[in-house]
Amino acid sequence: MLFGITGVLVWSLVALFVLARTIRFVRERARLDVGGRWVVVTGCDSGIGLGVVRSLVADGAAVIACVYTAEGAEQAKQAGAKRVLQFDVTDTAAVANATQQIEQTSGGNLWGVVHNAGVVLPGFVEYQLLETYRRVMEVNCFAVVQLTQPLIEMLKRSQGRVVIISSVDGIVSLPGNAPYDA
């Protein structure tokens, strides 16, 4: 009986050791080296976007920060962004200009785009104007496509990445947040 319990205990420890090593191996491989690579980040005025800029800069990436406000531009510069572009992600002409500047700044060697720009206009369905839904979709959905499409060729050449930051509301809809949850 003692030998059986000891054997189970030893094999359990071996299994835990192998599992821990496997998890460590996967985590080490999952973190990509961004050193010296150009990455665009939208929505860098504050919060998560500004945190992404700081993290990428700390990892050695060359960041092009896209902001909406002058205050956001200053914060992105202080966070270490190599280039800061201030524009409205829903303005077609401004996005076209920004993509040209991104290509010039990166020398066509863009490796990543992190879409973080977003807007929350909360409210219950019966009290919201259709325009509220349109504004939220313009920023949170269509702007992602509008900025990504002209950058796709550069991203393909560099075997780059597109990351879209979402919200817990994308999984669990909260009451009074209808436009955002849509």
Image (spheres, rainbow, N blue to C red):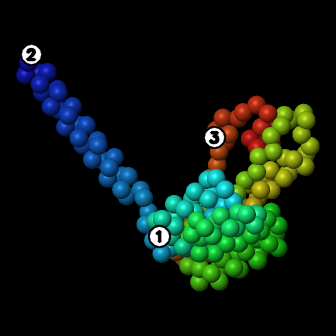
Look at the numbered discs 2 and 1 and tell me whether their residues touch, using CB distance below 8 Å.
no
Q: At x 32% / y 49%, what residue is drawn?
A: 24
Instruction: Pick whichever of labels 2 and 1 is earlier in the sequence.
Output: 2
Nearest to viewer (mark 2 / mark 3): 3
Q: Nearer the viewer, residue 112 or 1?
A: 112
Q: Nearer the viewer, residue 114 or 49?
A: 49
Q: Secondary structure at mark 1?
A: loop
Residue 152: give x, y in percent of width and height. Answer: 63, 71
Nearest to viewer (mark 3 / mark 1): 1
Nearest to viewer (mark 2 / mark 1): 1
Instruction: Pick whichever of labels 2 and 3 is earlier in the sequence.
Output: 2
- The amino acid on which the numbered mark 3 sits, given as a three-letter code, is Val
The N terminus - image quarter? top left
Crowding near pointer 1: few (<14 within 10 Å), some, many (20+)? some
Residue 34: give x, y in percent of width and height. Answer: 47, 68
Q: Which residue, given by chain and number where applicable, does mark 2 sit on?
A: 1
Q: Is residue 93 above or below residue 119?
A: below
Residue 12: give x, y in percent of width and height. Answer: 21, 31
Q: At x 52% / y 67%, what residue is drawn?
A: 57
Q: At x 17% / y 27%, what residue is drawn?
A: 9
Side of 138 relative to 50 (left or right): right
Quadrant for residue 124, please give it.
top right
Residue 115: give x, y in percent of width and height. Answer: 65, 59
Instruction: Pick whichever of labels 3 and 1 is earlier in the sequence.
Output: 1
Task: State the CA–CA distance, disc 2 to disc 1.
Answer: 57 Å
- The amino acid on which the numbered mark 1 sits, given as a three-letter code, is Gly
Q: Which mark is residue 99?
A: none
Q: Which mark is residue 60?
A: 1
- The amino acid on which the numbered mark 2 sits, given as a three-letter code, is Met
Q: Which residue, given by chain and number where applicable, does mark 3 sit on?
A: 168
